[in-house]
Amino acid sequence: MNERKSSGMPGRIYTDILNRIIEGEYREGDRLPTEHALAERFETSRPTVREALAQLRADGIIATRHGSGTTVMRRPDPDLRRFAPLESLSDIRRCYEFRVVTESGGAALAAQKADEADLDAIQRQWDNLQQVIRTEGIGAKDDFAFHLAVERASKNQFFITSLSIIHEQVEFSMNLSRNLSLVKSIERQELVQQEHLAVLEAIRRHDASGAEQAMRTHLENAMARMFGA
């Protein structure tokens, strides 16, 4: 968790504005109050307000354009607040951004280097996850195991290690995503499995470009499902 943002006045302002956006007080396309107005509301300085707004911009929630003020760009899924504190959302997004870059590259390399044992391992993890979905479970550990099996098939310790060392953060985001999927519908979980299957099939074909794109699409879709398109 980002301790700097989760404590102090910038964190309070960040959380307050994000709550107002989630609750619909500020809708997509709406302009936020000026820095001066926000500073007066929170009885703080404009630099403190700017720090909170900078974090909201980094999260893709707002955008500031010269001469047009600050505008709401997207509204996160309201159900997020049921499963995670608002201050953790930035770290979840950054984790996904990191994974888009690293795991897509790992999948491409896996398509080039995977042997039958690797393919069997990835297939086995996909099957395990499919069984979890059929029993309406969460399956975050099984989801992570699938992704790790793909990275192991790359035969490159750096890809394997980069995912392994962030397993707690990845499983947290997977738990959150899958909880949201249960709220929405079982169909959403099945859609995720189809994305996993696209990765598996591309690796089985030894299609490096296809595997890279399938993994990138899957992770970008996962981020969009959580934070909005």
Image: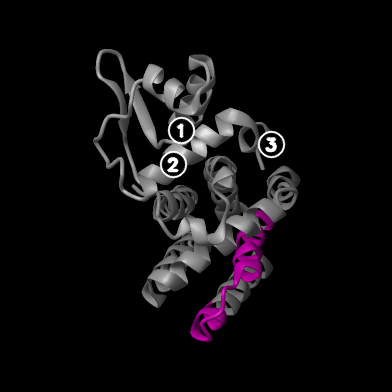
- Between 221 and 56, the one nearer to me in the picture: 56
For marks 3 and 1, the one nearer the N-term is 3
Give the structural element (helix, strand or loop) at label 3.
helix
Give me the C-alpha separation between circle 3 and circle 1: 16 Å
For marks 2 and 1, the one nearer the N-term is 2
Pointer 2 local density, CA inside 10 Å: few below 14, some 14–19, many at least 20:
many
Give me the C-alpha separation between circle 2 and circle 1: 8 Å
For marks 2 and 3, the one nearer the N-term is 3
Pointer 1 local density, CA inside 10 Å: few below 14, some 14–19, many at least 20:
some
Q: Residue at x 68, y 50 (%)?
A: 163
Whole-percent x, y for residue 220 in the image = 43, 48
Q: Viewed as shown, does residue 70 lie left or right of 17?
A: left
Pointer 3 local density, CA inside 10 Å: few below 14, some 14–19, many at least 20:
few
- Between 146 and 36, the one nearer to me in the picture: 36
Q: Which residue is mark 1?
A: 56
Q: Which mark is residue 18?
A: 2
Give the structural element (helix, strand or loop) at label 1.
helix
Q: Which residue is mark 3?
A: 3
Seen in the picture, residue 117 relative to 128 is either above or below; the reply is: above
Whole-percent x, y for residue 40 in the image = 43, 21
- Say which amino acid is labelled 2: Leu
Whole-percent x, y for residue 69 in the image = 29, 20
- Say which amino acid is labelled 3: Glu
Give the structural element (helix, strand or loop) at label 2.
helix
